[in-house]
Amino acid sequence: MTLASPERATTVEPLFYKISDVQRVLRLSRTVIYGLIRTGRLRTVKEGRARLVPASAIHEYAALLEREAGEDK
């Protein structure tokens, strides 16, 4: 058995984030995150009782902010 060298180690982005993780990633409060969810600006999925945010939804939200910033110019 061979161990992977540090040069070959890669970080894997999670597919889904908990709301607390999204707060850290986007640097927004819990209230703001739930407001974005309620208005449809940030997509979520439910797994059992857990509300999760797909990584793709975070990227889509960031792209939306960039588009909106471009419109303000």
Image (cartoon, rainbow, N blue to C red):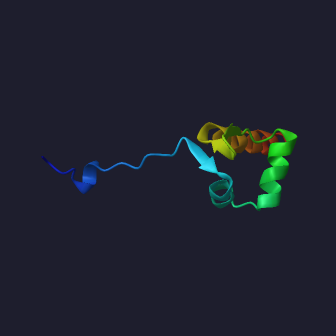
Horizontal arrangement in the rendering, residue 55 relative to residue 65 (left or right): left
Horizontal arrangement in the rendering, residue 26 relative to residue 41 (left or right): left
Q: Residue at x 81, y 47 (%)?
A: 36
With respect to residue 32, does 45 lie above or below?
A: above
Foreground residue among 67 and 5: 5
Quarter that holds the C terminus: top right
Horizontal arrangement in the rendering, residue 7 relative to residue 52 (left or right): left
Q: Residue at x 49, y 46 (%)?
A: 13
Residue 15 location, x and y as percent? 54, 41
Total labels drawn: 0
Rendering quarter of residue 63: top right
Rendering quarter of residue 39: top right
Residue 44 location, x and y as percent? 71, 40
Foreground residue among 67 and 13: 13
Residue 31 location, x and y as percent? 82, 59
Q: Residue at x 67, y 47 (%)?
A: 50
Horizontal arrangement in the rendering, residue 26 relative to residue 29 (left or right): left
Foreground residue among 25 and 63: 25
Q: Is residue 55 visible?
A: yes
Q: Is residue 73 visible?
A: no
Q: Residue at x 74, y 60 (%)?
A: 28
Rendering quarter of residue 42: top right
View extreme (front): residue: 48
Residue 52 location, x and y as percent? 66, 44
